[in-house]
Amino acid sequence: MAVVALSDTETLALPGDGLREGIVQQLRDVLGDALLDSLVKPGDDVWVRVRTDAWRAAGAALRDVVGCDYFCFLSAIDWMPSPYGRGEDDPTEPPPERSTEIRQGYTGGDTRMQVFARVRSIQGKFGVTIKADVPDDHQVVDSWISLYAGANWHERECHEMFGIGFAGHNDLRNMYLPTEFEGYPLRKDFPLLARMVKPWPGIVDVEPLPGDGEDESDV
Amino acid sequence: MTASLLAVDLPYWAQSMFRVLGGTVAVLLAAGSIVYLFLFKMMSFMQSRLGPMEAGPYGSLQLFAEVGKWLQKEDLSPERADKRIFKMAPLIVLVSTFLLVAVVPFGPDDYFTNFDAGVFYMLAVSSISVLGILIAGWSSANKYSLLGGLRAAGQLIAYELPMVLAVVGVVIQAGTMNMQQIVVAQNTGEIFGWGGIGNPYVLTQFIGFLIFMIAVQAELTQAPFDMPIAESELVSGYMTEYSGFRFLIFFIAEFATVGVFALIASALFLGGWGVPFSWFGWDSIDSIDNWMNVAGPLIMFSKMLVLAFLIMWVRFSYPRFREDQLQRFAWKVLIPLALINIMFTAVLKVML
Amino acid sequence: MSDLADRQKLSYIAAQAADARLNVELETEGMTLNIGPQHPATHGTLRIIVRLDGEQVIWAEPSAGYMHRGYEKLTEVRTFPQVTTLINRIDWLGSFANEVPFILAAEKLMDIEAPARAQHIRTILFELSRIANVSLFLGDLGVQLGAITPVFMAFRDREYVLNLIEGATGGRFHPNFDRIGGLKDDLPAGWLVETKQVMKKLRNFCTEMEDLLFGNEIFQSRTRGIGVIPKEVALQYGLSGANLRASGVDWDLRRDQNLPLAYDKVDFKVWTHPDGDSFARCWLRLQETREATKIVDQLIDTLPAGPIMAKVPRIIKVPEGEAWVSTENPLGEMGYYVVSKGDLGPFRVKIRTASFNNISIVPWLLRGVYVPDVITILASLYFILGDIDK
């Protein structure tokens, strides 16, 4: 992230600033109040969050208005903290109390799960990360398959890992897991079975090799 | 055959036994030497590695080790395969090789049979292996083998024609279909009145030679014509389901046929077992000294090795053609060329 | 190239015909063939179910997941330094390249920058892993098409690069060398000199490959016009790396992003090809390998002195935030979306791998092609199973 100091009055206006603000503005023009929140990291990246029912419209806006023709990926985040912690619980003792507060990340959110996607404009050399809430009671969002053909496989994977339905995608088979698999592995309440089977033996403190300074980041 | 060599009159059964022995030796020796020299060593050297070095000095006994390995494997056949045909298929391919070697002359008196339609017989019998490959692919109850068998059917039948047409040029020039006579004609012939190197038909029938070698490459399903085997797609094509002794028969048949076709090509184009008769002052086949019966097979063997080298060299260097590309090549390129070759040969034969 | 246009027209017609056949309800013909999961052609356990009509494919569907290891779930129970051991194994042929985007994302969240020397060496190892990966591709390309000799030369020359990587990092295949804030260790003595010599050998290898394989008429007739991917389709599916550039899109993440790697200090050419067929993809990767050797040479010449590691606390806790970093990996664009909650380990890591998108185009691409061309197309798209399946 190169910082170019232009002049005293312009030190805060980093190159690329106007570009990303402009993208947010374009989306706001198209989507109106369906654009719930946005975050711009100057010269770096831009995040937007849209209302769930505007998910497909936002994709269309990104593709047609903003000019993001390159589809990078589509996935989901489960914001609930894992009840299993970091998988290091001692199985002989009762599980400790953990916070169950759901705190979303950039651009906020109201639900436990969010879908997010990233698209990029080749001409403009910028990318946009777009998020949308997945309603807790009816975990379905619109499918992007009519906008970007590549979303097909990503939505299949997202469905099998998180259990989010995609309306309009007519072939939501499992991508990686066998067809009879029950449960949605990437949800936080699905335990990491390897740690269930063999509990974590505890952190082994590795002695630093001779010659390593105290700055070594060994854990 | 060996009657004149030993000056002893052998009974017929003894002669037949020698013939059988000789045939087996000819085929297996050809196969074995080609496998060791070219498949093990030459391919390895071309690929900047050494090849087998452990079994015997410089890996020379590797072939026996391989044979032993294949022999001791379990004799499998797929459950849904047509068992009788499945077991018969490799033998058909090997039988055609032995039948082919029956017309190859190895010396002035070293021949298994010497009949007048030798070339005709050779071309006809070489098609028997097509049958074996086809039924191997079909009876294996495996879709990959089936694909390989079907591809083989198309390819092998397509390349029969260029082979036949290429040989026709030689027959026209020699004026006979008898293999022994063709060899004699080459070695007694003269180029513009100079008998120094005889008249090997590779010089006048150069196009025919090329077409024959290409057609042989395709008949043996060697790269670049190895679509039926196509290791990276069909695993082994029609040979996929075979293991143990049956695979060994396919393997031996493949390299033995390379050897036998090389023998035939050297007989038809390179002058066979002979050196030009003018070197020793012979003027017909009856005046050849007896030691030629021993030297003949050796000369034949070395010429075979040269041609097999060519076949193997191309095999290791080129990618493979796609099925429609090789069909196009056979029908649109090779056959017209062969026909033009025949035309020129016939015209020149009449004129000169 | 009217020949190419003819072939494109033919393949378009074949695709239409294939679609038409599929729409006929009476399915009396056609054979379903499984290519894989065990197959000499696929780079691992990929299963492609094709429905054939004779030798033509009328429907194809890849079935991935035979090697799914659950990396995204595993990263949630790892600490940040431990994640690099995992992600090394995603693209196991050029494995240093897998660590880099993740480390960069973590450094972005922590707002630290590795010292210049570490960035430089990171870039050198990155390019070396690209060379190791793509030289195997070049050899394997021959084998898929039937030329069994180039692969041995590829492996022979790849050994030099692997020896270099081992000399610097201690591991041929899984270096696990990148650390948040820099690198684990400095380069051994004499490494730079040897690298220069190896780069010369690899340039010879590229020339050898060009003569032996790419100049061959049979190779050309097997790959030209096969598997043409138009530009718009490539962008829609998210194809990346050489596959995208072979369709004429001038996009290279090394040049078009300003990441803290040393690419802005070197001159290199971004190769593109207008055709979008298999030959273009293969040829492009050859040129990129040669370009990578030149990049390494320039990087070695301009390597600054200095520390290898920035000041990083012993126990790393990455502050709360989200970061996305993607780099131009040997296979394409690989990126990590790291969500951190201020913990010892990440909260969620989304791994965006190149081969996943590259293979998603296969159902669209394989309609109407012949079975041998299926192998050619798969070979030219170039995927690694660990990259598809994570």
Image (tube, helix red, strand yellow):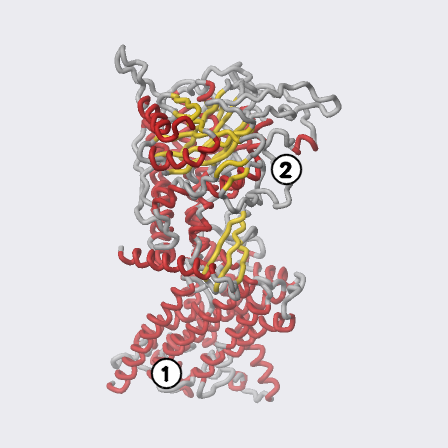
Callout 1: residue from which chain? B
Classify residue C89 as left or right of residue C291: right
Q: Residue C373 is drawn in which quadrant?
A: bottom left
Residue under numbered circle 1: B171
**Viewer can see residue C370:** yes
Left or right: B98 with respect to B304? right
Where residue C38 sits: x, y (%)?
56, 52
Q: Which mark is residue A98?
A: none
Q: Position of residue B152 (x, y in %)?
A: 48, 68
Near mark 1 (Cα within 10 A), the count class, few <14, some 14-19 or many ≥20, is: many
Which residue is disc 2 drawn over?
A183
Residue at 40% across, 65% down: B324
Kind of residue at badge 1: Val
Q: How many marks?
A: 2
Residue nearest the viewer, comparing A218 with B34: A218
The local secondary structure at tag 1 comes to: helix
Relative depth, front residue between C247 and A18: A18
Chain letter, disc 2 residue: A
Foreground: C234 or B100?
A: C234
Would residue B289 be visible to someone looking at this image? no
Badge nearest the viewer, 1 or 2: 2
Amino acid at pointer 2? Gly
The percent position of residue C379, horizontal first and vertical second, equals 44, 50
Outermost front residue: A33
Seen from the viewer's position, the closer of residues C7 and B135 is: C7
